[in-house]
Image (spheres, helix red, strand yellow):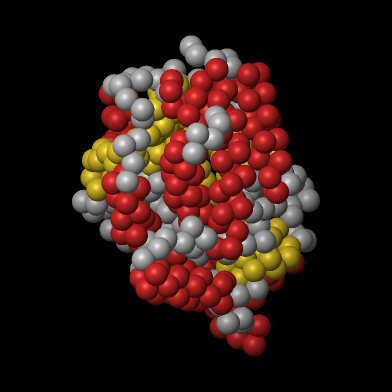
Amino acid sequence: MRLYLAVFALLAAVHCEELFNGDQVLRINAESEDQIQILKKLERDVDSGLDFWTHAVSTEQPVDIRVPHSSLYAVKDFLKKNNIPFTVIINNVQERLVREREEMVRNAEMESKTKSFNFAAYHDLETIYNFMDTLANHSKLISKVKIGSTYENRSMYVLKFSTGGEKRPAIWIDAGIHAREWISHATAVWLADQIAKDFKENRAPVPSILSKMDIYLMIVANPDGYVFTHRSSNPLYRFWRKSRSATSNPKCHGVDLNRNWDAEFGGPGASDDPCAEDYRGPSAQSEIEVKNIAKFIMSHGNFKSFMTLHSYMQLLMYPYGYIGIDAPDQTELHDVATMSSKALNSWHGTVYKVGSIFHTIDQANGASVDWAYLRGIKYSFAFELRDTGKYGFLLPADQIVSTARETWFALRYIMKYVCDHPY
């Protein structure tokens, strides 16, 4: 396997006529357990240069891989020789990246001229933080709370929605712990505005929820990584997943912040290789970003729900991620998630798969949802937002508002349920 991967670049050079202008995303549909194991070995080889957008778990789930243009011929040849079927779902990643960047530039110019904020557009960290300031400055309901600083010394903020009181029962929502999942940040921005509007306009159920509970919304849980994704339209930057901290390997930066939590840390559902996309870090909660969030939640001490937004694959999941057994509250959590997904579906017909993290997506040690649940926050859920692979991490901006609104329908159901079922 490793020998074959080592000659990918050489084969690509020999067959230069097969190269495409830019990377491609291949969708692989493994047909046997042997093929799954081949793909898992391929994913574990960090020197292959392949970017696995989804993981090899079972024959029921497709595997999406971004393949550098220089390796396309060799990778396709490898798959064909192993009789592993595949299709091209994104023909030229670079074209999509350039288009995305051009749209952002045009939007920034428009917003500057009109002094407005376009929710149907992606924004950089500075613009998001300015939006948070504007929201907090125009409403007594909202405050912008600094919970710490990142590895690169950027501030970490949450928006607190509260009608008064200290450490009341509370709901936590975060987005963007994986930097490249831009639709999660954009959805969270829209959600912040929607919560404020619904409260101001006395639109159910927000006023009722906020009469009993506070909502904390963290729009950017990984600021350093998010800034890095905006540096260039080069795939190296745009598809960055991790934080930006130094590791034991000077050539490989960053930790997967959603494998760094003190929740069965160090198990097989994360990597100990600093160059891997799911590198867990040297120890549980070694990363300052995770420490800041965990300290804030624990010092508050009265969170009743923990929800985290990711992308992509349209999934709504609950604990556990680190093991395949049912959580003590599995029946209730599954029922809540099922009803929440139905609420989401009612807006645009989008279908979500519901289940535990372990059985729905993959084993994951050190995940935030497990951490929250193991500390008594019963209603803990993880969302994987749109889509199911046509665009992957490059969801067009014209789908932001629709994605956000359907997600709001789901979150609203969960929040009302939590409010009506105190514990």
Q: Quick check: 195 left or right of 383?
A: left
Q: Nearer the viewer, residue 41 or 110?
A: 110
Q: Nearer the viewer, residue 172 or 17?
A: 172
Farthest residue to the front: give it. 201
Q: Nearer the viewer, residue 23 or 313?
A: 313
Q: Residue at x 67, y 23 (%)?
A: 335
In this rendering, the answer to whether 302 lies above or below 91 is above
Farthest residue to the bottom: give it. 17
Q: Which quarter of the figure has residue 75?
A: bottom right
Residue 25 picture location, percent across and down: 62, 66
Q: Residue at x 56, y 41 (%)?
A: 408
Residue 383 picture location, percent across and down: 56, 40
Q: Is residue 33 visible?
A: no
Q: Which quarter of the figure has residue 297?
A: top left
Residue 254 picture location, percent across and down: 34, 52
Q: Residue at x 56, y 77 (%)?
A: 95
Q: Residue at x 29, y 50 (%)?
A: 133
Q: How many marks?
A: 0
In this rendering, the answer to whether 221 lies above or below 376 is below
Quarter containing the N terminus: bottom right
Q: Quick check: 137 left or right of 203?
A: left
Q: Which quarter of the figure has residue 300?
A: top left
In this rendering, the answer to whether 330 lies above or below 119 is above
Farthest residue to the top: give it. 423
In this rendering, the answer to whether 422 lies above or below 73 is above
